Image (tube, helix red, strand yellow):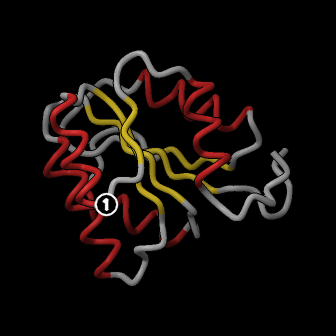
Amino acid sequence: MPGAGAIRVVVAKPGLDGHDRGAKVVARALRDAGVEVIYTGLHQTPEQIVETAIQEDADAVGLSVLSGAHMTLFKRVIDLLAERDAADIVVFGGGIIPEDDVALLDEMGVAKVFRPGATTYDIVDWVRANVGDGSAGL
């Protein structure tokens, strides 16, 4: 069971993408590493994701996008977080994202993009190193 001060991550599937196996695998790996995970389920709007992140006092939002709409969906989540004075919530994600788009997402404010082949160990290690204050007891 996560302790007080554990990192809190919202894992979300924005848009019309109906494949969530990878998001569930990442959510479970983070949970098993002591991260508090809130999984939003399929077909979430950016507005719903941001509302959940704020209500849950999340440290980060992890988006899984396989639909090809990553540029629009990541941007909308980042813009909404800024509008809600919650730009301190780290946004990261992964999916079928072309290598050429990774730099553009970085410029947009996405903290990290995990492409096909990334391991759950890589994701957990990155979250531990880049999310929260390091006192989560992980």
Tell whether 122 sits left or right of 115: right
Secondary structure, mark 1, is loop
Image location of residue 122, percent across then percent down: 57, 28
Q: Residue at x 18, y 37 (%)?
A: 16
Image location of residue 20, percent across then percent down: 38, 27
Neighbourhood count class around disc 1 (C-alpha, 10 Å): few under 14, some 14–19, many 20 upward: some
Disc 1 target residue: 109
Q: How many marks?
A: 1
| Image height of 97 relative to 6, above or below | above
| Image height of 47 relative to 7, above or below | below
Q: Quadrant of residue 65?
A: top left
Q: Nearer the viewer, residue 1 or 60?
A: 60
Q: Nearer the viewer, residue 68 or 126?
A: 126
Q: For the N terminus, which image quadrant?
A: top right
Q: Nearer the viewer, residue 121 or 53?
A: 121
* Residue sitting farthest toward the top: 117
Image location of residue 117, percent across then percent down: 41, 15
Tell whether 9 sits left or right of 115: right
Tell whether 50 sits left or right of 121: left
Image location of residue 56, percent across then percent down: 57, 66
- Inspect the image, locate mark 1, and give the three-letter code of the amino acid beneath it: Gly
Tell whether 35 sits left or right of 5: left
Q: Residue at x 41, y 53 (%)?
A: 111
Q: For the C terminus, which image quadrant?
A: top right
Q: Quadrant of residue 7?
A: bottom right
Q: Residue at x 75, y 58 (%)?
A: 134
Q: Quadrant of residue 126?
A: top right
Q: Residue at x 14, y 40 (%)?
A: 69
Q: Nearer the viewer, residue 129 or 5?
A: 129
